[in-house]
Amino acid sequence: MADQHQGKPRKLRTSVKGPLMFSAFWAVVAFFAVVIFASGGSARAPRFDLAFTAAGIAFIVTLVIAAMLSMSYKENAEHLGKGSGVNLSSAKNPSHGFGGTGTKDVPESDGGPDGPADR
């Protein structure tokens, strides 16, 4: 609740409106899906009892999931974005083994026991 300031509207992530809209959308989708598919064809009456039950279940389940996810949300610490970690750059660095701008003295080999390498 640290993001709240008196007199200012809440962000969508910290307000109640976001999870309610999300849950209401999936409840409407579940309602229409059950009305269409549970009737078993156009010769039978639509099953509104099953549709309202499915919409209620979808609303409650998605609201609980959205609430749990919003409670577990936490901003990253400020120092994590400052570049103090390892391998944050994709630049070629000789110390990483990518053969950057530095030169290494590689001793020339005679090719091993078989003689010179360039036959």
Image (cartoon, rainbow, N blue to C red):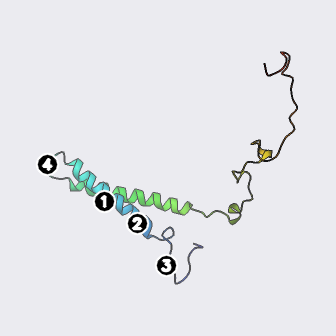
Q: Earlier in the sequence, mark 3 or mark 2?
A: 3
The numbered dot on residue 61 is: none
Per the image, label 3 sits on a secondary structure element best described as loop
Left/right placement of residue 36 relative to residue 17 reads left
Give the CA separation, mark 1 to mark 3.
Answer: 27 Å
Per the image, label 1 sits on a secondary structure element best described as helix
Amino acid type at image mark 4:
Ser
* Residue to which mark 3 is pinned: 9
* Residue to which mark 4 is pinned: 42
For label 2, the crowd category at 10 Å Cα-Cα, with few meaning under 14, some 14 to 19 and many 20 or more, is some
Q: Earlier in the sequence, mark 4 or mark 2?
A: 2
Between residue 32 and residue 94, name the one nearer to us. 94
Q: Position of residue 73 (x, y in %)?
A: 56, 62
Q: Quadrant of residue 79?
A: bottom right
Residue 112 vs 27, above or below: the answer is: above
* Residue to which mark 1 is pinned: 28
Left/right placement of residue 87 relative to residue 61 reads right
Tag 2 near tag 1, CB within 8 Å:
no
The residue drawn where x is 41% and y is 56% is 61
Per the image, label 2 sits on a secondary structure element best described as helix
The numbered dot on residue 20 is: 2
| Most distant residue in the left direction | 43
Q: Position of residue 111 (x, y in %)?
A: 83, 22
Residue 96 vs 89, above or below: the answer is: above
Amino acid type at image mark 3:
Pro
Give the CA separation, mark 1 to mark 4.
Answer: 21 Å
Amino acid type at image mark 2:
Leu
